[in-house]
Amino acid sequence: MERTYTFAQFEKELDEGYQMYYTYVRNRYMLFKTNKNCYTQKLLSKHDKNPQPVMSMLTHKRIEEMFPFMEDIEYVVN
């Protein structure tokens, strides 16, 4: 993904119903908007030595904090 990709673009795509795929701390996730200020994050990769929650609910603020560290961002139309 280009360095010019901003959080505003990411947020707009989530608002439009896209499912976002990204890598965060060596794990692959899928993220989609569930409701206002509520997002669902699903774990796609599995590492036995570092188990993570399979599904979690996140707020807009948490997504904004994570965004600078997300890698390999892709999206899929739901």
Image (cartoon, rainbow, N blue to C red):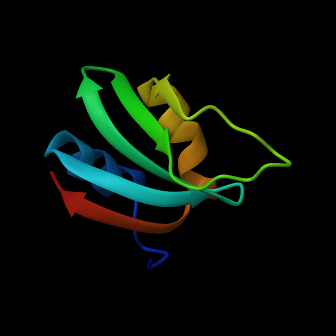
Residue at left 51%, top 27%?
A: 56
Which one is in front, 24 or 5?
24
Q: Is residue 20 left or right of residue 61?
A: left
Residue at left 65%, top 52%?
A: 46
Q: Is residue 57 above or below residue 41?
A: above
Which one is in front, 20 or 43?
43
Residue 12 rendering spot, x and y as whole percentages: 22, 48
Residue 25 rendering spot, x and y as whole percentages: 71, 54
Most extreme residue toward the front, as rendered?
48
Q: Is residue 5 above or below residue 56?
A: below
Residue 52 rendering spot, x and y as whole percentages: 69, 37
* Screen quadrant of the N terminus: bottom left
Residue at left 75%, top 40%?
A: 51
Which quarter of the picture shows residue 34? top left
Most extreme residue toward the bottom, as rendered?
2
Q: Is residue 26 left or right of residue 5?
A: right
Q: Is residue 60 above or below residue 11?
A: above
Residue at left 23%, top 61%?
A: 76
Question: How many tags in the picture?
Answer: 0
Which one is in front, 77 or 70?
77
Which one is in front, 6 or 66?
66
Residue 39 rendering spot, x and y as whole percentages: 37, 29
Which quarter of the picture shows residue 69? bottom right
Q: Is residue 5 left or right of residue 71?
A: left
